[in-house]
Amino acid sequence: MKKPVFKRLEGGCACNHVRYRLERSPMIVHCCHCHSCQRLSGSAFSINAMIETDQITLIGDGAPTALEDDPLMHRCPKCLLPLWGNHPMIGKAIAFVRVGNLDKADHLIPEVHYHTASKLPWVSIPQNVPTFEHGNEGDSLMDKEAQSRLNTKLERSELPPDRVD
Ligand SMILES: [Zn+2]
Ligand SMILES: [Zn+2]
C-alpha cells in the first residue's frame, strides 16, 4: 500500500490542555479488535500509530502524565484522556499514539488489523489490508525504513544504564 505524503499531524486531549505534534510519519498504524481495546475505547476497536517518542513534540500548555496503576499510558493530567502508550516489551522510546486523538485522524490509515477473531461483525476491513485473527504471529509488516527506525531505538533502549556513555 502506498503511503500518503506525510504532513505533520497535531492532536490533543479532550480539554485541550495537552496538545502535541507528530514530527514524522509513524512507522506503522495498527488497528486492534481485541476485547481489551474495545473496552478501553468504549467502541469497536483501537487505532494506534507507532512512532519514536522523541518525535512527539508538546505544543500546548500541559504535559501528559501517567496514573500510578497504569504507568505505561500517557494521559492528560486534567481530563485523563489517554494520548499514547508504551509497550512493556518495546520500551519507552517507542510510543503508540491513539489515532482518534489527532485533529485529522483520517490522514492515518490502519496498515494491519489484529485480533479480528473478536472483531464486531458489522466492521468490514478493506481486502488489501493484512489481518490477523489474534496477534501478529509472523514477521513484521513494517517496511524496511520503518523496521530500521524501530531497531535503532530498541538497540539504544536495551543498553543497561551503566553502559550508556
Ligand atoms: Zn485534557
Ligand atoms: Zn487490542
Image (cartoon, rainbow, N blue to C red):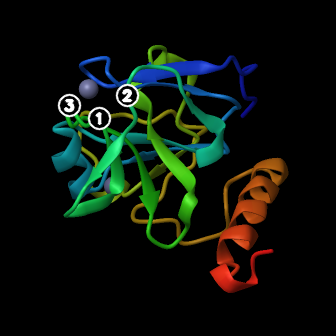
Quadrant in which the C terminus is drawn: bottom right
Residue ID at (78%, 62%): 152
Is 140 placed above or below 62 here? below
Tell me: is circle 1 under 8 Å from ligand 1. yes
Q: Is residue 160 visible?
A: no
Tell me: is circle 3 under 8 Å from ligand 1. yes
Q: How many marks?
A: 3
Residue ID at (25%, 37%): 77
Is 155 placed above or below 98 here? below
Residue ID at (72%, 28%): 3
**Residue carrying label 2:** 62
User: Do the CB atoms of the residues marked 3 and 1 lie less than 8 Å apart?
Assistant: yes
Is 112 placed above or below 17 here? below
Pinpoint residue 79: horizontal percent, then vertical percent.
19, 30
Residue placed most toward the observer, 94 or 61: 61
**Residue carrying label 3:** 78
Q: Residues within 10 Å of mark 1 (few under 14, many from 20)?
A: many
